[in-house]
Image (cartoon, rainbow, N blue to C red):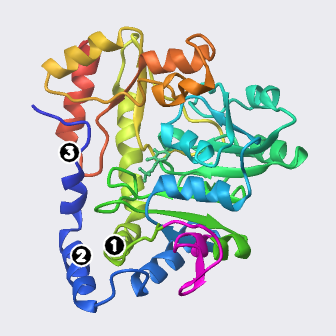
Amino acid sequence: MKIMPNRLDRGFQMYKEEFEAKALEVLNSGYYILGPEVKAFEEEFAAYTGAKYCVGLANGLDALWLAFRILGIKEGDDVLVQGNTYIASVMGITINGANPVFVEPDSFYNIDVEAMKKALTPATKAVLVVHLYGQASNMEEVVTFCKENNLYLVEDCAQSHGACFNGKMTGTFGDIGCFSFYPSKNIGAFGDGGAIVTDNEKIAEDMKMYRNYGSRKRYYNEVVGANSRLDELQAGLLRVRLKHAEELTEERIRIAKRYTEEIKNPKFTLPQVREGATSVWHQYVLRCETRDDLIEYLNESGIGTIIHYPVPPHLAEAYAYLKKQKGDYPITEQYADSVLSIPMYNGMTEEEQSYVIEMLNRY
Ligand SMILES: *Cc1c(COP(=O)(O)O)cnc(C)c1O
């Protein structure tokens, strides 16, 4: 059997007729940028998360850097962020000239709140939490810490659409929640897409200005903004996906449950879910001390896997100027050396799941 780490075509096939009908509807409509589909998606996505406002954007990275831009985060400011994240989280900070202060992760791969408290500096202006792999971070403690220290709170929800902490959805705890709809995300478009959610009307209005060259009124530009508009076709297709969000999440939870119950091999550390948190299983990530050998073994068995992520941002060439070294963040680095994401996608058959489980148990 041949199993790829992800199968985006399966997610299309599940609702093929609906996607095709919507695509034709948008093509026939004559509206392609900032029209009725984007407006409807923004309303529906805000309602889905429980936030007051949603603003559609071109991608997740824009959501992050524009969020910090609007909050006034700039050169000289420190932003706390977990070390074990996708590099886009960090770029959202550094594009604004601000300084990322890396914090070690906890055993759930989210920001370690005790380490976060110790990392506070006089220059700290904001915290960026990343609900990595689909699991909500320890938001009760994070929110309290931000309030006590008068810090902005931004959430990177690129992997956590629909994940909750104490029943409240990720993206709604802080000032701004940032989402990506890159095709492989849990709610994925058929191209690039992103959004922010917020309860703050001014932030929402400012974001609408920034995404469109800094203009509220056509050809009257207040700031140097961006071209970061979600297009009508993606918004329409995202509305189809959003309609099925609950069943898509439930399917991932079912697959993860099988993995957790049936993978029995002392060589692996399986993922755990924190009390009060839910995971929407963007990835199912296990750790293995002989990871590279495991990858080879699985490859030979026809099973593809991905490392999320092999190089932590503090050791990336792009951030050489931060002058960090190997050994500076040992937990982050240990995770980078041992994590492995096994196949997890909507439309994964039971036979495929069984085969992955069997081969992992035989390792
Ligand atoms: C995918 C991702 C992003 C960036 O989203 P894009 O739409 O690709 O720009 C940011 N942060 C995390 C954690 C991601 O997984």
Span colored in magenta: 207-226
- The disc, 3 or 2, on the residue closer to the chain's N-terminal end is 2
Picture residue at 41% right of the left edge, 31% below the top: 308
Q: Where's residue 312, x and y in %?
A: 50, 25
Image side of residue 214 versus residue 12, left or right = right
Q: Which mark is residue 349?
A: 3
- The disc, 1 or 3, on the residue closer to the chain's N-terminal end is 1
Q: CA distance from mark 3 to mark 2?
A: 22 Å
- The residue at the far bottom in this view is 29
Q: Which mark is residue 240?
A: 1
- Amino acid type at image mark 2: Glu
Q: Where's residue 324, x and y in %?
A: 61, 19
**Residue with the mark numbered 2:** 18
Q: Where's residue 192, x and y in %?
A: 36, 60
Q: Label 1 near label 2: C-beta < 8 Å?
A: yes
Is any atom of residue 255 visible in this view? Answer: yes
- Comparing labels 3 and 2, the label whose residue is closer to the camera: 2
